[in-house]
Image: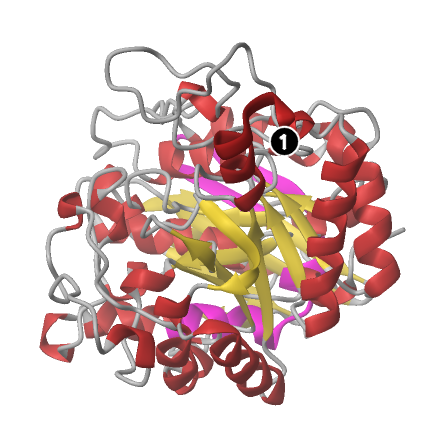
Amino acid sequence: MSPPDWAKHAVFYQIFPDRFARSGAVEAQEAVQLTPWGTPPAEQGFQGGDLYGIADRLDYLDALGVTALYLNPIFASAANHRYHTYDYYEVDPLLGGTDALRALLDAAHARNMRVVLDGVFNHASRGFWPFHHVLENGPDSPYVDWFRIKDWPLRPYAADRPHNYAAWHDIPALPELNTDHPPVRDFLFDVARHWVDFGIDGWRLDVPREIETDGFWEDFRGVVKDADPEAYLVGEVWGEAPSWLRGDRFDGLMNYPLLDITLGFFGAGSLRDYSKAHLTFDPLDAPAFARELERLLALYDWEATCAQLNLLDSHDMARAQWILNEDTDALRQAVLFLMTMPGAPCIYYGDEIGLSAAGDPHCREAFPRDEADWDTDLLSFYQSATALRHRHEVLRTGRIEVLHASGRTLVLRRTLADATALVAFNAGTDAAQVALEAAALPTKPLSSAWPPSTDAPLSASSSPLPLPPRATRVWTTD
């Protein structure tokens, strides 16, 4: 089964719900003490962002060019990031509960905007009711096989002795679910189907490689696609993983390998000394970048390549602008690269207004309420970049090839039926001249598509192409 067509054309926006927008309409927040909005995220408190707040900001997201939302976990949890789920069938009351999700889905769908939820199915929390049942009843609990327990009594909170059950990354607060146990699988599949039936448009699956039960993800896909063949399934896999995108598990992956080389090329002169998981952010020149790009594009079938979730950062790492050491020119080129690549670009909330921070928890800061704290020029740029992608289908699903890679300059060609686009980057600080063979240009005239104010057409007589420092140029026939 091919990925859903809508995902290939989407522009995603990732939201950390506690930190995006607070509506003031959540009853459960009225009787509790929240951390003030904008408190430094290292303090870890609940700042009160909610799903009604997201619904209130759909005009903003629409104007940004967003067509799909990816929300970090929203189910009942005792953590602000909500990866510690204690009730998979309840939207967290502090987010507005299930009524707020209903309101958000209805408002988003009225705009043809999709909503994908974060599914955390490898581990739950110490407050998850089957785990509590085992804690109270020990080996007599009928739910004892839902977890991998080493000895008794259960020690989830002992300060002087280690916990004695399997836990994600050995964190006692995150007991792993025993997915080899059929009732656990049935439970998780029912959760997945329940929310698809409710109206969500897909799942982003947390740490899927941690679930090693044979056939789990194949069966999961079958359940979800039976409920909605157009549901999008994207996995959090940080490395290269062709076996996961053969049509029997996921539609796409979070494309961290592409993120790595993208920031490595466009930020080669300004990168901080930073690494994360498999990401090294090594500086790359254009030939090395082109080789890596072609290798990554060859890893997957074309349908899967077009359904990848392409990103520059996320809640699990430093923000792109911080990694680039506040080099906004490099950030803009990296954004334009994603907007002209196959695969759905994903904007991490606040990047478009200039948020810059080190890794978790700093990258989970509150979205500034005061527009005086926004980089409005950067916001206008993001709006124009998403409009470019939406305007030209060839930039979304056209085939891609490298025409030129030398020094700090790169030229790509996208083709779709009779449409052609040329995308040229000069990531260097010096002006450059790029010579293209006349055969590389289509017979139809190429009109300037970027920058938006440039009207000069491109023809065989235009070569060599002059590229100012840190410039991006896009020409299209459609």
Q: Position of residue 215 (x, y in %)?
A: 84, 30
**Amino acid type at image mark 1:** Ser
* Depicted 21 relative to depicted 421: above or below: below
Tell me the quarter of the picture where residue 110 sits.
bottom right
Would you say 64 lies left or right of 108 here? left
Q: Nearer the viewer, residue 259 or 365?
A: 365
Looking at the image, can residue 283 be seen?
A: yes
Question: Relative to 171, does residue 3 appear above or below in the rendering?
Answer: below
Q: Can residue 229 be seen here?
A: no
Task: Name which quarter of the figure residue 294 lies in.
Answer: top right
> Viewed as shown, does residue 273 lie left or right of 25?
left
Residue 394 belongs to the span the image colors magenta: yes
- Measuring 61% from the left and 26% from the top, which residue is drawn there? 147
Which quadrant would residue 384 be assigned to in this image?
bottom left
**Is residue 324 or residue 455 the one in the foreground?**
324
Image point 29% across, 71% down: which residue? 379
Residue of label 1: 141
The image position of residue 366, as x and y in percent, is 21, 62
Camera-nearest residue between 448 and 82: 82
Q: Which residues are magenta?
A: 383-412
Percent of width and height locating residue 98: 53, 74
Q: Secondary structure at mark 1?
A: loop
Q: Residue 362 vs residue 243: left or right? A: left
Residue 95 drawn at (x, y percent): 38, 69
- Residue visible at 40% across and 76% down? 54
Q: Is residue 62 magenta?
A: no
Position of residue 254 relative to residue 19, above or below, is: above
Mark 1, residues whose alpha carbon is within 10 Å: few (<14), some, or many (≥20)?
A: some
Residue positioned 33% across, 56% down in the render:
332
